[in-house]
Image (cartoon, rainbow, N blue to C red):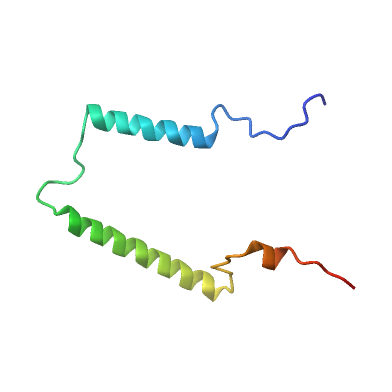
Amino acid sequence: MADATDTANVIIRPPIAWGVAVLVGLALNWRLPLRFIPAAIPAGGLGAMVFALALGLVLWAILLLGGGATLILQFSLIETHARIVIE
């Protein structure tokens, strides 16, 4: 038991992997730009639809979690979890 540190035993740490993926994506977009939607579809309308769907998903999740008495918006962890009990 010479090394008792707790590690994830991964090749590359997740934030570094995410950063590398973003940089590779940007480099690929610079070298070989691809259009994912036709030019005939207005980007503003598509963005508005995606935003509305995301907002609906968030509201549905709040209603679903709220129905199960789950705390949804918990802003202060100190107030709810770190209390001094004196008896």
Q: Residue at x 68, y 67 (%)?
A: 79
Looking at the figure, which quarter contains the N terminus? top right
Q: Examine the image and state in which quarter residue 55 appears.
A: bottom left
Apparent side of residue 63 relative to residue 55 in the rendered image (left or right): right
Q: Examine the image and state in which quarter residue 31 appears.
A: top left
Apparent side of residue 63 relative to residue 87 in the rendered image (left or right): left
Q: Position of residue 50 (x, y in %)?
A: 28, 58
Residue at far left of view: 40
Task: Out of 66 and 73, give the one closest to the viewer.
Answer: 73
Q: How many marks?
A: 0
Would you place residue 59 above or below residue 24 in this image?
below
Q: Residue at x 9, y 50 (%)?
A: 40
Q: Examine the image and state in which quarter residue 53 appears.
A: bottom left
Q: Residue at x 31, y 33 (%)?
A: 26
Q: Residue at x 90, y 73 (%)?
A: 87
Would you place residue 80 above or below residue 33 in this image?
below
Residue at far top of view: 2
Q: Position of residue 39 (x, y in %)?
A: 11, 46
Task: Out of 44 and 64, give the one closest to the viewer.
Answer: 44
Would you place residue 29 above or below residue 79 in this image?
above
Q: Position of residue 65 (x, y in %)?
A: 52, 69
Residue at far right of view: 87
Q: Position of residue 63 (x, y in %)?
A: 47, 73
Apparent side of residue 53 relative to residue 37 in the rendered image (left or right): right
